[in-house]
Image: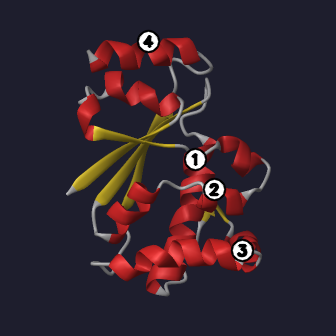
Amino acid sequence: MQKKFLNLTNGIEAIERYSLDISEVNFIRIQSTHCEQFQFERILLELDNNFLMWLALGYECIIYDFGAAGSETSKAVYHGVEWIKYVLNKRWFGKDTIPYVRGKMVLSSFQNYYSQLSRKTKRRIDYFKNFLLVTDLKLVSITSASSYDGQKEKLAELIKTYIT
């Protein structure tokens, strides 16, 4: 059981690149800006409810995203998704995982950000724990360099082409 999520905006490119059926994809927005500015709590607060629910129910959630020109991996994937995995494993399963960002172990940084999470954020994440049907998180990413980085009009056209 899989659910596909396109990270807005560059993730839209996956529709064309992987011949995805647009009626079978979902959209999510993990902002690279939040990663760059170390706003890790905002990443969690802005996660889509459907995304969290599908993960709790045991679906494999695949996030498609594309890095800026010349980069094979987007910041949202290599930093943001790693942070999401770290927090969900800790909150839902009581597992202390060892996070890596671009090959560097970042456990102490993530522990620090985690210790600063508000009760509101923890309660939001914990809400979905009530629906857990699994003992492991199934969250993967598919990423590559973007062919359309910064071309929002092109990506909007791409959606229009595949929706009709």
- Kindly indicate whether the residue at mark 2 contacts the one at mark 3 (C-beta within 8 angstroms): no
Mark 1 or mark 4, which has the lower sequence index? 1
- Kindly indicate whether the residue at mark 4 contacts the one at mark 2 (C-beta within 8 angstroms): no
Mark 1 or mark 3, which has the lower sequence index? 1
Residue 17, position in %: x, y?
Answer: 34, 24
Lateral position of residue 87 relative to residue 62, left or right:
right
Mark 4 or mark 3, which has the lower sequence index? 3
Badge 3 is on which residue? 117
Lateral position of residue 45 relative to residue 113, left or right:
left
Question: Image point 55% across, 83% down: which residue?
Answer: 96
Q: Quadrant of the C terminus?
A: top left
Badge 4 is on which residue? 157
- Kindly indicate whether the residue at mark 1 contacts the one at mark 2 (C-beta within 8 angstroms): yes
Give the Cα separation between the discs numbered 1 and 3. Answer: 17 Å
**Could you tell me the amino acid type at mark 2?**
Ile
Q: Quadrant of the N terminus?
A: bottom left
Of residues 63 and 98, which is closer to you in this image? 63
Kind of element beneath mark 4: helix
Q: How many marks?
A: 4
Mark 2 or mark 4, which has the lower sequence index? 2
Above or below — where is 142 with respect to 20?
A: below
Give the Cα separation between the discs numbered 2 and 1. Answer: 6 Å
**Could you tell me the amino acid type at mark 3?**
Leu
Residue 46, position in %: x, y?
Answer: 59, 54
Mark 3 or mark 2, which has the lower sequence index? 2
**Could you tell me the amino acid type at mark 1?**
Ile
Give the Cα separation between the discs numbered 2 and 4. Answer: 27 Å
For disc 3, the neighbor class at 10 Å (few under 14, some 14 to 19, many from 20) is some
**Could you tell me the amino acid type at mark 4?**
Glu
For disc 2, the neighbor class at 10 Å (few under 14, some 14 to 19, many from 20) is many
Badge 1 is on which residue? 30
Badge 2 is on which residue? 43
